[in-house]
Image (cartoon, coloured by chain):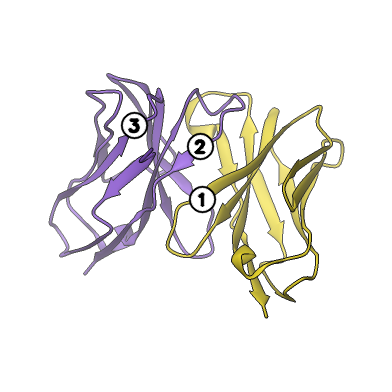
Chain colours: A purple, B yellow
């Protein structure tokens, strides 16, 4: 099982550029989400989806867009990169909504640097 | 505001020794508490999930405890191994939807030395 696959692993952008971080899962999970991890802070939710065609904002959604056209894929788009978006981004999926006792399965992250 | 505080921030122990990591939370209404292990350069991996009615849960050499009255949890690692070197993250879930569903602690960084 591949689990949750994120690409690319590393990316360097210049301020103002746009890009898409890819996330795919092969576990038929309904719930998918994007987090960012910054030094000394807990993971923060950017956007999430409870099923294909349904997305919603998390705690820190500004500057990011998502879509969920299929159950498997949940790409994260940076519209106009800023240095404050330098971070490690994790995609995670779960069998059910995270209110319930279903564990989150994380990808191995994308390390993004914006110069 | 929902918060999860972990202590210590970092810890160094010798291989074979035991250690205990702490997690205090102010989250309401509580649904479950999770512990994750995150190796350097990797995503977090689930160790345990505990509901309100569970006091103790084990996963191999990892044992998590939960005191819902005092809103405290601990993760005990027995007979540590070099592979236990990682960050350990406490996460609390609320009985709510969406963006406030999970609150993450900032983690305890454990280093096991030979």
Pointer 1 and pointer 2 on the same chain? no
Residue closest to the eye, B88 or B113: B113
As drawn, the residue found furthest toward the bottom would be B114
Instruction: Determine the chain carrying the residue at label 3.
Output: A
How far apart marks 1 and 2 lie (CA) works out to 9 Å
Q: In this view, does B87 lie to the left or right of A78?
A: right
Rendered location of residue A70, percent (x, y): 25, 23
Q: Which residue is the site of mark 3?
A: A26
Pointer 3 and pointer 1 on the same chain? no
Is disc 1 in contact with disc 2, using a CB cutoff of under 8 Å? yes
Quadrant where the C terminus of chain B lies? Answer: bottom right
Name the residue: 24% across, 30% down: A67
How far apart marks 3 and 1 lie (CA) works out to 18 Å
- The numbered dot on residue B44 is 1
Residue B11 falls in image quadrant: bottom right
Instruction: Determine the chain carrying the residue at label 1.
Output: B
């Amino acid at each position: 099982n591949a689990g949750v696959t994120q690409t690319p692993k590393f990316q360097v952008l210049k301020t103002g550029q746009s890009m898409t971080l890819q996330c795919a899962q092969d576990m038929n999970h309904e719930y998918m989400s994007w987090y960012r991890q910054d030094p000394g802070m807990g993971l923060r939710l950017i956007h999430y989806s409870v099923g294909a065609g349904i997305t919603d904002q998390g705690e820190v959604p500004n500057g990011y867009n998502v879509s969920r056209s299929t159950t498997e894929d949940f790409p994260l788009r940076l519209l106009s990169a800023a240095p404050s978006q330098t971070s490690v981004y994790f995609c995670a999926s779960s069998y059910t909504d995270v209110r319930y006792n279903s564990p989150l399965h994380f990808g191995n992250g994308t390390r993004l640097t914006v110069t | 505001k929902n918060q999860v505080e972990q202590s210590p921030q970092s810890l160094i122990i010798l291989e074979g020794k035991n250690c205990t990591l702490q997690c205090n939370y102010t989250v309401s209404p509580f649904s479950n508490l999770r512990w994750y292990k995150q190796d350097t350069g990797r995503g977090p991996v689930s160790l345990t999930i505990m509901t309100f009615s569970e006091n103790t849960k084990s996963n191999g050499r990892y044992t998590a405890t939960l005191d819902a009255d005092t809103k405290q949890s601990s993760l005990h690692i027995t007979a540590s191994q070099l592979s236990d070197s990682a960050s350990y993250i406490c996460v609390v879930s609320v009985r709510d939807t969406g963006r406030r569903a999970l609150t993450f602690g900032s983690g305890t960084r454990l280093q096991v030395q030979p």
